[in-house]
Amino acid sequence: MGRLRRESMKIIEAIDVTKTFGQSSVPVDAVRGIHLEIEAGEMVAIIGPSGSGKSTLLTLLGAIDAPTSGQILLEGTDVASLDDTARTTLRRRRIGFVFQAFNLLPTLTAVENVALPLELDGVAEKDALARAEAALEMVGLRPRRDHLPSMLSGGEQQRVAVARALVIQPALVLADEPTGNLDTASSQQVTDLLRELVDHQGQTVVLVTHDIEVARRADRIVTVRDGQIDHDAAPLADHDSTHSER
Amino acid sequence: MFYWRMAWRQIRRFPGRSAAMVGGIIIGVAAVIAVSLATQSTDQAFDAMFESISGRADLEVASAGGGSFDAEVLERIADTPGVQLASPLIQRPSILYFEDQRAKLITLGIDPELDQHVHPREIVAGRSLREDKGLLLEASLANSMGIEVDDAVQLLTRRGLIKARVIGLYRSLQTVATSGGASVLMSLTAAQYATKIPGRVNTIQIVVEPDADVAQVQAAIAAELPEALRIAPPAARSSLAKETAYATQQGMLTSRAFSLLVAVLIIANTFLISVTQRRRQIGILRAIGTTRRQVARMLYSEAILLGLVGAALGWLAGNLGAGYLARAMGTLFETEMPRTQWDPMSLLPAVLLGVGIALLGVWWPVRRASRLAPTEAMRESVITDFRRAWRWPTLLGVGLIILCSGVLSQSLQGKLPPIYSAWAGALLLSGLVLLVPLVTRPISTALSRLLRGVVPIESKLALQQLLRHHTRTSLTIGVLFVGLSTGVGMASSVIDNVADIRGWYRKAFVADLFLRAMSPDMATGLAADLPDEVGIQLAAVPHIRSLGTARFVAAEAAGQSVIVVASDRAERSGSLFDLTSGDPNGLAQRMAEGQVVIGSVLASRAGGLEAGDSLEIETEQGLETLPIAAVANDYMAGGRTVYMQRDLAERLLGVEGVDAYMINAQEGHLEAVRRDVRAIAQQHGLLLQTFSDIQRQIDVMMAGVVAGLWALVVLGFVVAAMGVANTLTMNVLEQTREIGLLRIVGTTGAQVRRSILLQGLMMGVIAFVPALAAGVLISYLTHLSAEPVVGHPIPFAIHPWLLAGSLVGGLVVIVAAAWFPARRAARLPLLKAIRHNQ
């Protein structure tokens, strides 16, 4: 399998980003002056101990939350300067999310869950469902299109979540502990899937994980400690800090 | 379509919660539809009765006292320019007997040639009065009694029971036939003979030329009429009947306002629970790019769908309830009500109302849900800054309390219509509910401390859970508060009103025996004539200590339609009236001297008349001024009554005939008198009643409406139970993992069960103590706002057993509602519980 290589292009860039919680009482800096650049077609793993600020960083990169200071440039647009509606629209159109707890809507079938972001964006139901089926095909779950989440295994649910993230053809896929709730086999499947997306479709993926095996599949591993980037490099032979955390 | 699909899936996934919301909507819609249709039906019944008599007439000439007058005036009226025709009419309530059946109806004596232009009728069987002599009977009544053409029937008249042949059956081409307005037709001369008024009529009905001005014709005729006669449009006369039903209708409208409030609170509580449970889902939606507006649209779509279902079911329930209420009103006013119409067009306002209630109820929860930040929504638990979240609802609550207190005070002073007080009362309660969050924390903490000595673990756990979901707890307390306070308030009012009515009839109906053909028709104020022979026969009965008479006639006094009760009382005593103004001592003497006693509603409507004032009354001699001896609490004819001595009524209003005899027997001779009078009653087909018979009759009349109001009280408890069950189920669901952990570290199932039951009981105690006080206040305000309607203050009383019973009943209901969630919590499988939400 040959890897798809793109010209170097920054998809997202964090410039001196800080996020402080509890400003009125005891302020806590969850993220402190972080600088981070992610290129198109890269798979970046963010690791670090609990409370290190990695999930907060992911929510800032994903425009779910706004930084207290600094800039987040997604394809050149400063996310922090957008109002809530604009940030929401940006998320809907340019960022695909995969969460640890699968986070599918229990009342919708697999295909409907995948079609959801498209329908929210005003795509006609028929077109949305067709594109959702194609996305399910990509993750190998087309035969399970009409199943409710409760009828799918954990691994299958997470693959549906990946399909939902992909269906909008996002600039960036953000995954928060995507294998955290899965057994080893399912975890392997989901990691393979994310890797394939990067290799074959040039998709940019940023994932937060505790699992060093998952992190090793990334092109870069960013280690966050106490709200700051401690280490940013290609995977080495071992990452004891993460192992010890686990 | 997308939003509807999402909403529908959500509804299907949580059928119980959806049912609770639909239940709230049903309560609101059904209350509005039932009360509106029943009120409309009552008004229609009265209108139909008058239309069946007035027909196409534009104007009517009648005597000031409602009695008969010489028919010679007919020609002059007919010759007046602009008059197309003038048709004479005799109308008397009567009783028709066929085999062993008895029916109340109106006997109409008509000129068949002229009358056909006023009352277009179709002969559906037999012959018309132009072709034959006898009676024409309304077809629907004949069918219900099994009467056919050429059957012989008996009719009660002043000449006694007269036999007559039914020559035909008719159907009105103008009004919807109701047995309430059923009538029997006979020729004018036959009616004059039966009612002993030869050459006289009760009314002349006038149809005006199509191009003539009715007001001008009225003025022209008025100028020609003798002083004893009045001319007016016929519709005006139905106002008395409508006024009679006014007080009851106001009571129902008040209940409607409170039902709507309860409905909105149930919906708000249920939906708040529903969106709290979906907080995480909402977070996902927000994270993947759903805007606040789209979240709100999804939730509103759900509310609209539930609103539509609730409206349709509420419409059905409302129509069924309207049928019941209309029948109850019919019994109360002794009038056959028309069947309430299942009007498909009323579905539209019902739908608008249902959806409106749903949207109003979900507004606050939706607002909160759509404002959730994605990161906040996806967290396992949310700690809300309740002071900030409740800042403006608190301000709104205070504002509502101030505003509604002002409106209430204006309404109670008569500066605003009484219905304003109902709405202001309901909104005042809403204002109090909005302030509940302020007391939830301190009171529940205090309660928990009190209980700590008895159930230390359970009280701590219960307090934690209640405060964790401050808004939900406060709303549930609000639902309990409104449910119980409304229930107690209404129940207390019902008890006081019933006591007031009983106090009235115990004074008003004082005699050993009552002999009458029927009770006076509430709509016309008239009763069937008793045969003149009855008086003669009664005079001959031995051992009668005193014999009184009463005659009810319609008249105009102080600019109001009133019923004059012309009476020779059996007992000349002031205690016969339940006086609200005036001295009972020497009252009989003052009445004998020409003074009158007036009903409290009339006194109130005429600008607060009191004993010592004077009353202007239209008489055959023109406007007369009569001194008022006293004002009495009176429920007859809606309290718009004027009691006067018989001879005065004969002189002023031309009263003739008797509607009822009140008989007192000499001591030790009651049975003998009863036997003799019963023989007379049987001979003439009359009703012989004792005081307890009348008491029973009035109780039966009131029973339907009273039962309806008690149903509201029960509803209050049901609503409270729904709110508690909903909240506790949700609490247990959210506590699943925590309960699992507690069980693992050694908390017993019984302790878990007790902690859930305690949550319910603590909410109950916080709600019920102020609810009982608010219930008493509601009852007091209801009494005050009823005063302008019933014309006298209804004695207000606090009923300790009602309060204690409600408190105990309410706590029992709460324990019952909490039982299943508590049992579920105690029986949670441990491993499953600790994996919950992981």
Image (cartoon, coloured by chain):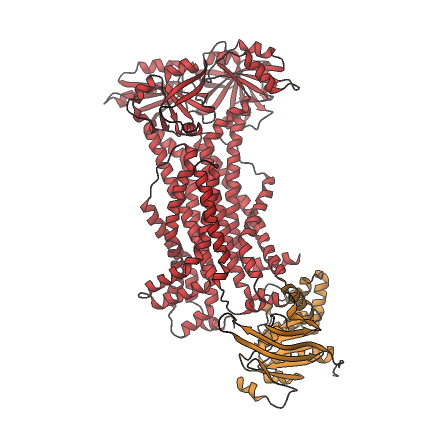
Q: Is residue B665 above or below residue B452?
A: above
Q: Is residue B352 above or below residue B46?
A: below
Residue in front for this viewpoint, A85 or A1: A85
Q: Colour of chain A?
A: orange
Q: Is residue B59 above or below residue B720?
A: above
Residue in front for this viewpoint, B56 or A43: A43
Residue B618 on image: x %, y %: 46, 18
Residue extending furthest bottom?
A237
Whether residue B444 appears in this view of the structure is yes
Residue B181 on image: x %, y %: 51, 26
Q: Quadrant of the N terminus of chain B?
A: bottom right
Residue B805 on image: x %, y %: 34, 49
Q: Tell me which corner region of the image, top left, top right, bottom left or bottom right, holds residue A102.
A: bottom right
Whether residue B128 appears in this view of the structure is no
Q: Colour of chain B?
A: red
Residue in front for this viewpoint, A30 or B307: A30
Left or right of B319? Residue A216 is right
Residue in front for this viewpoint, B176 or B675: B176
Residue B221 on image: x %, y %: 57, 14
Say how many tags the image has. 0
Residue extending furthest left?
B668
Q: Tell me which corner region of the image, top left, top right, bottom left or bottom right, holds residue B363.
A: bottom right
Q: Is residue B587 above or below residue B806?
A: above
Left or right of B341? Residue B660 is left
Residue drawn at point x = 51 percent, y = 18 percent: B108
